[in-house]
Amino acid sequence: MRLKNIIDKLAAPFQGRRPGLALAVIRAGETIAAEAFGCADLAAGLPCALDTNFRLASLTKPFTAMAILILAERGALALDDPLSRFLPLRTSATLRQFLNHTSGVLDYEELVPSGAAIPLRDRDVLALLQAHPGAYFAPGAQFRYSNSGYALLALVVEKVSGVSFAAFLRAQIFQPLGMSHTVAYEAGVSNIARRSLGYTMTPEEAVETDQDLTSSVLGDGGIYSSITDLRKWDEALYTGKLVSPSSLRQAFSPGPLETDFPGSGYGFGWYLTTRRGFACQWHYGSTCGFSSWLERVPDERFCIILLANRRDAQLPEIARALQEAW
């Protein structure tokens, strides 16, 4: 009852005809809370549900990293291969350094020409970086969170596998795990069942801000998924369904440098820290109209999943409150 009361209080800003929130709390492998609030589509009055699909934004990055690990296990690439082995970009940074955000590659968002109107794709990220040679620092010298790096990793997946990044994720991750409605969204190609639209709150109203210039870049943030499917993802990370335990240990081992969150390291697509004495694996997502949060405590088989179709949904604070209830 205490958890239910806490959830109801936390969900109050999402209730009614407002952009919504979907959440799950998993403990000891059992879902102890799973609820949805508010609207997936305000104009249509469509309510959020556990199978509503939200844009994950940067919560996509663990999936991109998993795609690289799958290819590494198959011997198609090595984590210490330089990116330049696969893509025509002047850098000595390795795939490992791109995975843990120590590549030094420039942020593509800062390179987009003024007045650009056509949404970028991963290939456009490569073109921007080719046109603007340089780096923030020598590979491995610093940590700097990089959307560019994960867009480039998606292109590596395409180059090595011979299929599109979206097709690789579908065949090698989503379908094997039964994540039947999760998709790396490509406008005009993909169909998103039970799709939510994204919004930004103003003092007067919720303004639809579903897509922007970077929304079509897949490797850093282009996946849509639901509470229903992400529960399957969490469960799979305790198993060898996708990659071996040794590969998972690498993904969940921090790189050599502290991140932009003090006290945290970064593995392959995961922030890594200690909370309340337990090792914790987590990532967030934030974009023009969506927020997301997934946090795991493997020793307790504890997981919090939060998806919202509004920016600045204060999900870290909600996650902390749910942790305290645990």
Image: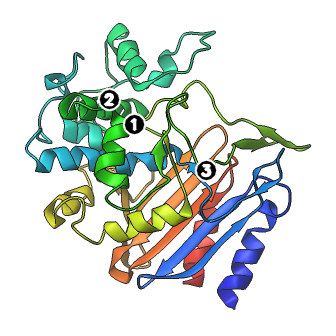
Question: Which quadrant would the C terminus be assigned to in this image?
Answer: bottom right
**C-alpha distance separating marks 2 and 1:** 7 Å
Dot 3, how many residues are within 10 Å of its Cα: few (below 14), some (14-19), or many (20+)?
many
Q: Residue at x 39, y 36 (%)?
A: 219
- Residue hosting label 2: 152
Amino acid marked by disc 2: Leu
Dot 2, how many residues are within 10 Å of its Cα: few (below 14), some (14-19), or many (20+)?
many
**C-alpha distance separating marks 2 and 3:** 23 Å
Please say if the residues under marks 3 and 1 sit with CB atoms less than 8 Å apart: no
Please say if the residues under marks 2 and 1 sit with CB atoms less than 8 Å apart: yes
Q: Position of residue 110 (x, y in %)?
A: 50, 20
On the question of residue 116 being in view, the answer is yes
Question: Which quadrant would the N terminus be assigned to in this image?
Answer: bottom right
- Residue hosting label 1: 219
Q: What element carries label 2?
A: helix
Q: Which residue is drawn at 23% across and 38% down?
A: 97
Amino acid marked by disc 3: Ser
Q: Residue at x 27, y 46 (%)?
A: 67
Q: Position of residue 305 (x, y in %)?
A: 53, 65
